[in-house]
Amino acid sequence: MQILGVGVDIVEKSRIKKSLKNELFIKRIFTNLEISLAKNKKDKVSYYANRFAAKEAFSKSIGIGFRKNLNFNDLSIKNDKLGKPLFVITEKLKKLIKKIISQFKKKNIRTSLFINPTVKDIKLAKNLDTDCIELHTGRISNLVKANKSFKKELVMIRKCCKLASLIG
């Protein structure tokens, strides 16, 4: 089996620290949401460096990097309640991903998206026309490990599995 679309990026924090002195850099690379969330962060350099690296890795994973009219501001990163990073994508990026998936299909390459078990993500995967999905179950694993109630999360996973099966 061949895996296409792995993106990895490592960034030197000193490079980001220097770049953060330039307000234009911040506005060109980071979304208003990310800039707003940074105000509450003690270590802003790490905060911005992590987001920069994640955006670079994401752009590489979809096979184009920051080309073809893809900009850093088309992608925003926030964290869930447990700190896991989540990608927030624009309509422009959704269209681009759908186009990439379509090009893969024309070459008989199957696609799979790794998503959170939410109705919103299930519907997005359907709209993008991916062949299959993989549900992230880290939240339920963390709850079990912490000896906390996981019933609500399990209900959501089941609901999403039923929806995914129903809509194909």
Image (spheres, rainbow, N blue to C red):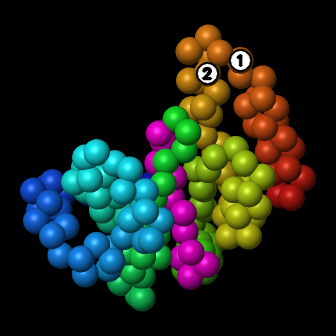
Among numbered discs 1 and 2, the one appearing first in the sequence: 2
Report if residue 64 is visible in the image.
Answer: no
Residue 106 placement: quadrant? bottom right
Q: Residue tagged by mark 1?
A: 149
Residue 150 position, x and y percent, is: 71, 22
Residue at 47%, 39% in the rendered image: 83
The numbered disc on residue 143 is: 2
- Residue depicted at x 36% and y 70%: 30
Image side of residue 165 versus residue 126, left or right: right
Instruction: In the rendered view, tell whether residue 93 sits above or below residue 81.
Output: below
Report the magenta residues as a range.
83-93
Q: Are marks 1 and 2 in contact (CB under 8 Å)?
A: yes
* Residue 11 sits in quarter: bottom left
The residue drawn where x is 47% and y is 65% is: 33
Residue 92 inside the magenta-drawn segment:
yes
Query: Looking at the image, is 158 positioned above or below residue 15?
Result: above
Going by the numbered disc 1, the residue's amino acid type is: Ser
Indicate left or right for 99 with 7 as reference. right
Q: Mark 1 and mark 2: span between their CA atoms?
A: 7 Å
Residue 41 or residue 2, whichever sits in front:
41
In the rendered image, the residue lying farthest to the bottom is: 69
83 displayed left or right of 50: right
Closer to us: 25 or 84: 25
Q: Is residue 53 left or right of residue 94?
A: left
